[in-house]
Image (tube, helix red, strand yellow):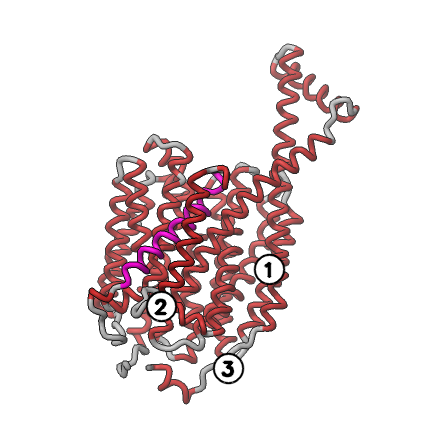
Amino acid sequence: MQHESLVEYGPRRVIITITAIFCALLEIVDTTIVNVALNDMKGNLGATLNEIGWVITAYAIGNVIIVPMTSWLSAQFGRRNYFAASIIIFTVFSFLCGNANGIWELVFFRFMQGLGGGALLVTSQTIITESYPPEKRGMAQAIYGLGVIIGPTLGPPLGGYIVAHHSWPFIFYINIPIGIIATLLTLQFVKSPKYAEKKSRKEVDWAGIGLLAVSVGSLQYVLERGQEDDWFASKTITTLTITAVMGFFFFVWRELTAKNPIVELRVLKNGNLAVGTVLSFILGFGLYGSTFIIPLYTQSTLGWTAQQAGALMIPAALTTAFMMPIIGQMLQRGVKQQYLVALGMFIFFLYSLWGYKIITPDTSKDDFFWMLIFRGFGLGMLFIPITTLSLSTLKGQQIGQGAAFTGMMRQLGGSFGVALITTFMATQNVVHKNDLNSHMSYDNPVVQQRVHGMQHNYMMTKGMTTDEALRAAYQTLDRIVTKQAAVLSYMDVFLYLGILFLICIPFMLMVKGNKQPKKADLAEGMH
């Protein structure tokens, strides 16, 4: 057992907290900063649309593979060394990404960057949690949550600005100075817990590592590429789905029977962590799903630039930032986590309903403002209570294992969210388009009048012949219908996301919460 406490005080705690948040931010900003630069990369590296998508996919796969293993790797190499090594890997591969000459070189570097990055997220959470005494953990999670919530929002406007004023490699180079500073601070200030003695290399659970990488990697691939490859019409997707299912089955069996498992599944017997893991999945679904859909809608339907679309999300992120410390305080005063989560889910439901109401083919920027502020409030109430609820009854090494589970589920929830939303929108688009076309019978006098009006207009303004003008009028009409169908699909997504959150509320209220740790439990919590 470890007697030397990891709880820090004064300036040391401030420095450790800042270091950890910077690392979490580095990793998360990099998940979304690339999205706005894909077009430039595509032209620059001579890649197809399908190939350039791999720049995002490879990073996500690297992330999801490493996250569940972080707790074990920390025990193996010492947390400080492992954390510093992760920052170095991340920083070095950021530099290489910026220098990549071909698309597949860039994809490989992104995968390696993802392996370094995945650790930053979870380990920084564990470091922050353990640097604060148990009764201040709510505050600790609030501080960490700032990074996690603001990160995805900062990515697109930052990426948009860099691409507009410099060239795309700079979105990777920006990581280098931060990485160097974070490495130095980590080596100087972060302590390693003296948990279990190091396992000898012979006892390493290689089978567990292999099964984990194969199953999680396959699942992530299926989620990221399924829609483009037309799901089960593609042999690759079908094969990988079967691989993922079988891999998970054998992985769980292996981890429950191995002497030194790479992922300690038994920690999920903890009721709060089990609930927290499910909630993290739903949070990822809502957080990444809505972060994905709004920029997509504003850019593809309303024709905004990446920078405008990114800037739209900033006030909401600031609202969440403002909410975080308040929620941290409320938890410290003993407000029950499950009530806050239920309220957060209700606010998220109202935000989705609001979105459903205001989306049109030409919604103005001002219409979004209060709706997104609302989203900021909702997210603030979800993130910290879910995290503190998950980790509230864990001690020592279990904190790291618990953080790894919630982190992985949040990532997977996001991937599921984006995959489901894109598929759902593609099918709804077809449904709405057919539906609209069925009302557009060309013997309908209103339709005829509209077409003739446009035809006349084209002949007058563009000097077209009668036939050309008629063809142009029909094309314009088709474009209007397509846009309208897209808008209806976006409305559906908002509506169903809202319903999903509404359904979760009663289950949330049934969860038994924990009492806040009393002062007497403090010595216990140190061990």
Label 2 vs label 1, nearer the camera: 2
The one of 56 and 224 positioned closer to us in this rendering: 224
The residue drawn where x is 35% and y is 68% is 257
Query: Which amino acid is tagged 3?
Result: Lys
The answer to whether residue 222 is magenta is yes
Query: Which amino acid is tagged 2?
Result: Thr
The residue drawn where x is 41% and y is 64% is 405
Q: Secondary structure at mark 2?
A: helix
Q: Secondary structure at mark 3?
A: loop
Other-residue count near label 1 (Cα within 10 Å), few / some / many at <14 / 14–19 / ≥20: many
The one of 525 and 195 positioned closer to us in this rendering: 195
Image check: 354 left or right of 196?
A: right
Label 3 vs label 2, nearer the camera: 2
Residue identifier under label 3: 515
Residue furthest to the right in view is 445
Residue identifier under label 2: 257
- Along the polypeptide, which appears first: circle 2 or circle 1? 2
Residue 469: mark in rendering: none
- In percent of width and height, residue 276 lies at 49, 68
Label 1 – label 3 distance at C-alpha: 26 Å
Image check: 314 left or right of 465?
A: left
Q: Is residue 22 visible?
A: no
Image check: 59 left or right of 392?
A: left
- Along the polypeptide, which appears first: circle 1 or circle 3? 1
The answer to whether residue 346 is magenta is no
Other-residue count near label 2 (Cα within 10 Å), few / some / many at <14 / 14–19 / ≥20: few
Check if mark 2's residue and mark 1's residue have beta carbons within 8 Å: no
Residue identifier under label 1: 501
Task: Quadrant for the C terminus, please.
Answer: bottom left
